[in-house]
Image (cartoon, rainbow, N blue to C red):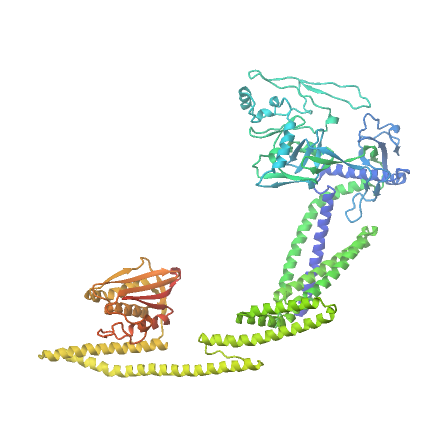
């Protein structure tokens, strides 16, 4: 039952992911389709106007597609649409009477135009191609109502007379001297940059803007806010009193404006607006010069809003009117220009700020241009002789599926989609994410027996599952593409086929992803690939060959020379064969011979390398090495066997020596213990005798000598036992963090009286802060005690001894230096041996074990002890690793 539940839950997870992912994809597709049609972010009156204009445009396409016939009159009558077609030039109707039948080249209505009708302009020629659909919008795969013109499109080169950027609409525009043209999105990029504009581009636009400055710019109302060095002081005073400066545009109606009208005619009308001089401030005696404004049809310049700027802004002129710069050279942004011939970066000080003209620029039907160079564009235009103006309006009895009725239905549906589609997309996306997480957690879970469960796909190699996945995905895409390529895709059957193909593709992707996750959890993502299995099959013999070559080259100094000589010989042989006419028959034999020869040479050198390595290890003192003489050549085998015999003989000798040493150590230990017991009794009885009242002074002096020598003998026996234990490693150390500074001060303090008695001055160099080492506190004190005792016993009286504690690269070093009283005629290594003393006369109380014991204890605790003899200078360094203070408990 548990297995059935797991299988059913897995099926529900995968099907749920597929369904919700299809819903999310469908929502995104519909959202993008609405956005492409301009319907996504439009509502209210604007949405209604957009829908009705689209319906009128679709009727226009249907009518003009049959302009050589009856303009699809039957279709218009069936749908209930009144339509009239007028031949125009640049869409200019002039003084045409739209109620006069002679105005039209075709119309299917006789009554006068109603109060509300729709007018569209369409370019078409005899070679135009049409795409027709009875749907107002087709959001699937079939194109809607479109006309494709190939012979009436052309590009006209234009020089740039000014460039600006609308920060509200995020659009760039250029001024060609007559009108604004929208710059293609691929021709520029407004981006952040700390480098500023390029020199050449900046220089070009400095000249362009300089050529547009009007002669009377210093009296222009806008330039009063600029920092103009050529202005007089009187003009500067007038500037400070103004809070903002306005541009007077063609749309402003003032009391002093005078308009001259002429009678309408077939030619263009020319209206000139003259601005009378107006006294702005009688006390300052400033006046505005009259500005001559071109005709609205000729100029194509959108009406300007009131523009303000600060005193530091750069002034840029377009058609004699002043605009603020978008920024300065250090604003951190640039306008990157991408031309087909040249490109460059333009600083914002050379870009006019057109943000205040956003509404006018967006409402105008501006043409679009592509940047050719940084200072010129190619304007996309249409031949106006192929332009038609189409007037449409619905009849009272229009059909249910007419474009206008479809527009009305969309008007009620689209506002709901504005809310429903994003919400549906988010909810389905969250559900897909949750189900995917659950599926990932479930994939490869441990079963009841503690084994990582799997599925069929996860057991196949990764490449095989990828090929299966690719085939299924290709089949699904083919089904979707086939269904989308025919008209029946808009029917329910076509949508079902597309949905099935999408479901299969998504489900296959889920199963493949699950197999990848399972392999990842099993830690065999790479191991479960054909590449890994092939490499693994080839790796073993290849690794053996590479290891053999590495061994030969690393073990034999002249291995590279042998390889080089073999290559030279092979090259000479190859060149010799190359000049032979019948070289093809010899080349194969030569290659086989070289392969066999290389294998033999590598094998021989590998065996020789084994023998050599064994000899080198033996020379370094490794007596455990053995030469494997199996399958060796006869000479090398005999050499290897001889080395094995040498090792056996040396091991026997060493073992005998070690046995002798152990016996000697054991003898010393046993004898010392045996002597220690009666010696203790002697010391105790001597002590009792000293407590008796002897009148004989000679007997008392004898007791003192007996007591002193008995204690000396006891000290010797104790040192012998401790030296034996230290040498044999039988001492158990209590390792802990020891304060090296405090321990050294205590040791020096213990010998203060004896040092003064010997007239020896100790100079210490000990750090003020605590320094820690890891050692046994008792035995480390014993080491320091032995070294201080050595100074007292063997230093020259009246001299100075030096005791130091230093930190050096993570190590703590004790240093003891003194001048020897007796001549040191032996080396430092000999002084470290047992029973060796610096005074050869042996007239001191030492027994020659102090340094040996100190070294053994130091090394047993992980330290290092070094002795240096330089003339009469005796120096000992004891080093331990430093313990970090924070780690000290």
Q: Position of residue 422 (x, y in %)?
A: 68, 48
Q: Seen in the image, is 568 located left or right of residue 748?
A: right
Q: Quadrant of residue 120?
A: top right
Q: Is residue 131 left or right of residue 598?
A: right
The structure residue drawn at horizontal position 83% and vertical position 51%, both measured from the top left corner, is: 486
**Residue 181 on image: x %, y %:** 71, 34
Q: Position of residue 52 (x, y in %)?
A: 78, 38
Q: Residue furthest left?
A: 695
- Foreground of the two, 45 or 677: 677
User: Which image quarter holds the N terminus?
Assistant: bottom right
Question: Which residue is depicted at the point 74% across and 44% down?
Answer: 413
Q: Position of residue 796 (x, y in %)?
A: 22, 66
Dividing the picture into quarters, in which one does residue 211 lie? top right
Residue that appears at 82% across and 25% down: 95
Q: Residue at x 45, y 75 (%)?
A: 619
User: Front-most of 157 and 361?
Assistant: 157
């Amino acid at each position: 039952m548990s297995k059935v539940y797991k299988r059913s839950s897995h099926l529900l997870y995968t099907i749920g992911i597929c369904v919700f992912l299809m819903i999310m994809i469908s929502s995104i597709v519909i959202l993008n389709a609405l956005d492409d049609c301009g319907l996504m972010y439009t509502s209210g009156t604007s949405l209604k106007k957009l829908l009705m204009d689209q319906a009128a445009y679709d009727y226009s396409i249907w009518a003009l597609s049959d302009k050589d016939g009856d303009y699809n009159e039957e279709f218009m009558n069936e749908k209930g649409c009144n339509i009239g077609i007028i031949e125009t030039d640049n869409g200019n109707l002039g003084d045409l009477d739209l109620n006069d039948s002679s105005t039209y080249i075709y119309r299917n209505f006789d009554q006068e135009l109603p109060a509300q009708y729709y007018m569209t302009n369409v370019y078409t020629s005899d070679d135009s191609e049409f795409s027709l659909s009875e749907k107002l919008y087709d959001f699937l795969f079939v194109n809607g109502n479109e006309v494709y013109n190939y012979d009436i499109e052309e590009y006209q080169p234009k020089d740039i007379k000014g460039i600006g950027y609308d920060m509200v609409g995020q659009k760039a525009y250029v001024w060609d001297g007559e009108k604004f043209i929208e710059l293609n999105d691929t021709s520029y990029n407004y981006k952040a940059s700390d480098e500023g504009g390029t020199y050449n581009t900046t220089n070009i636009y400095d000249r362009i803007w300089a050529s547009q400055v009007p002669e009377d710019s210093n009296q222009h109302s806008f330039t009063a806010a600029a920092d103009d060095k050529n202005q007089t002081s009187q003009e500067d005073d007038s500037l400070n009193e103004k809070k903002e400066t306005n541009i007077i545009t063609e749309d402003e109606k003032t009391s002093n404006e005078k308009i001259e009208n002429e009678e309408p005619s077939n030619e263009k009308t020319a209206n000139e607006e003259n601005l009378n001089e107006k006294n702005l401030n009688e006390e300052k005696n400033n006046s505005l010069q009259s500005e001559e404004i071109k005709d609205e049809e000729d100029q194509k310049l959108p009406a300007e809003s009131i523009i303000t700027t600060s005193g530091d802004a750069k002034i840029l002129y377009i058609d004699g009117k002043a605009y603020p710069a978008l920024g300065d050279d250090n604003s951190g942004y640039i306008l990157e220009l991408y031309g087909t011939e040249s490109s460059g970066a333009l600083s914002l000080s050379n870009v006019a700020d057109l943000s205040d003209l956003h509404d006018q620029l967006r409402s105008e039907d501006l043409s679009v241009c592509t940047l050719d160079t940084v200072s010129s564009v190619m304007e996309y235009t249409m031949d106006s002789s192929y332009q038609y103006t189409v007037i449409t309006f619905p009849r009272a009895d229009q059909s249910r599926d007419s474009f206008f009725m479809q527009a009305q239905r969309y008007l009620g549906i689209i506002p709901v989609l504005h809310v429903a589609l994003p919400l549906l997309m988010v909810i389905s996306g969250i559900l897909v994410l949750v189900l995917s997480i659950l599926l990932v957690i479930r994939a490869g879970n441990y079963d009841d027996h503690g084994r990582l469960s799997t599925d069929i796909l996860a057991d196949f190699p990764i490449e095989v599952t990828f090929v299966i996945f690719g085939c299924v995905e290709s089949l699904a895409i083919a089904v979707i593409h086939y269904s989308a390529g025919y008209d029946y895709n808009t029917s329910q059957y076509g949508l079902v086929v597309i949905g099935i193909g999408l479901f299969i593709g998504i489900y296959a992707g889920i199963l493949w992803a699950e197999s990848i996750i399972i392999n990842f959890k099993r830690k065999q993502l790479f191991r479960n690939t054909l590449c890994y299995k092939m490499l693994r099959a080839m790796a073993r013999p290849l690794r053996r060959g590479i290891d053999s070559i590495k061994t030969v080259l690393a073990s034999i100094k002249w291995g590279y020379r042998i390889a080089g000589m073999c290559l030279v010989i092979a090259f000479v042989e190859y060149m010799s064969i190359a000049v032979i006419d019948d070289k093809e028959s010899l080349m194969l034999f030569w290659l086989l011979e070289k392969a066999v020869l290389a294998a033999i040479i590598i094998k021989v050198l590998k065996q020789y390398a084994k023998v050599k390595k064994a000899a080198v290890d033996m020379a370094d003192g490794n007596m455990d090495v053995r030469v494997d003489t199996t399958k060796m050549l006869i000479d090398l085998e005999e050499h290897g066997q001889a080395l094995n015999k040498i090792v056996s003989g040396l091991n026997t000798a060493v073992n005998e020596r070690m046995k002798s040493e152990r016996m000697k150590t054991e003898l010393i230990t046993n004898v010392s213990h045996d002597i220690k017991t009666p010696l203790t009794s002697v010391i105790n009885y001597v002590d009792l005798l000293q407590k008796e009242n002897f009148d004989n002074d000679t007997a008392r002096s004898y007791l003192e000598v007996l007591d002193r020598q008995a204690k000396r003998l006891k000290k010797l026996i104790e040192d012998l036992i401790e030296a034996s234990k230290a040498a044999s490693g039988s001492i158990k150390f209590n390792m802990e963090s020891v304060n090296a500074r405090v321990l050294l001060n205590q040791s020096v303090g213990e010998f203060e009286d004896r040092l003064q008695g010997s007239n020896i001055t100790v100079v210490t160099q000990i750090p003020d802060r605590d320094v820690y080492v890891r050692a046994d506190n008792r035995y480390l004190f014993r080491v320091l005690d032995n070294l201080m005792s050595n100074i007292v016993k063997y230093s020259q009286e009246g001299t100075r001894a030096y005791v130091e504690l230093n930190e050096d690269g993570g190590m703590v070093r004790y240093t003891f230096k003194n001048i020897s009283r007796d001549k040191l005629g032996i080396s430092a290594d000999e002084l470290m041996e047992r029973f060796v003393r610096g005074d050869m006369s042996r007239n001191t109380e030492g027994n020659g074990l102090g340094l040996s014991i100190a070294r053994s204890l130091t090394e047993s605790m992980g330290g290092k002890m070094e002795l240096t003899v330089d003339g009469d200078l005796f120096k000992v360094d004891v080093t331990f690793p430093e313990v970090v203070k924070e780690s000290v408990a």
